[in-house]
Image (cartoon, rainbow, N blue to C red):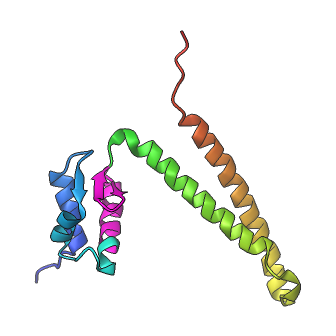
Amino acid sequence: METKIESWEYLAKDILEKRQYGEFIPHHELSSILRIPVTDKNYHHAIGRANKLLTEKGKKLKNVYRGGYVVLEPDRYVEEAERKFKAGTKRAKEALAILVYAPVSLMSDDARENYKMVEKSIRNAVALAIGGLTEVKLLNRPKLLIK
């Protein structure tokens, strides 16, 4: 019995074995490897699956708007991590805003008790994320040369 290999696995293998850091791969080429049209909803899902595996193997794809993807250069990993962290912090703030403006007075007693615990937990997580993001930004600044 033969094991079926998913299209995203073919893509990951292609990138790991044949592609260099910094190499641009246009959408039409990725579509050909995946055998999924660019317009198909599964196209970006397959790239995401491949990218998860690639990240664990030391390579990562980064989207180039309307062009394709580039194999992220090693010197860009910290910048990319900061970008993802910033996006996550923004989403955490959005989650907190949902709770801040929630109609608490209309909630049942059980829902209100749950709300208080969850709101406190999310508020603490957002504060930690904001503090962490500030630290990451400071650490990722270009170093000033002192003469």
| Quarter of the figure that contains the C terminus | top right
Q: Does residue 30 appear left or right of residue 107 in this picture?
A: left
Task: Give percent across and percent down for residue 14.
Answer: 17, 59
Range of magenta residues: 45-71
Height in image: 124 above or below 6? Answer: above
Determine if the magenta segment contains residue 57: yes
Task: Give percent across and percent down for residue 122.
Answer: 72, 66
Residue closer to the observer: 22 or 128: 22
Question: Which residue appears at 58% of the width and 41% of the height?
Answer: 137
Residue closer to the observer: 92 or 69: 69
Identify the image quadrant of residue 61: bottom left
Q: How many marks?
A: 0
Task: Give percent across and percent down for residue 76.
Answer: 39, 42
Question: Residue farthest to the top?
Answer: 147
Question: Which residue appears at 80% of the width and 85% of the height?
Answer: 111
Determine if the magenta segment contains residue 89: no
Task: Give percent across and percent down for residue 24.
Answer: 24, 52
Q: Does residue 46 appear left or right of residue 114 in this picture?
A: left
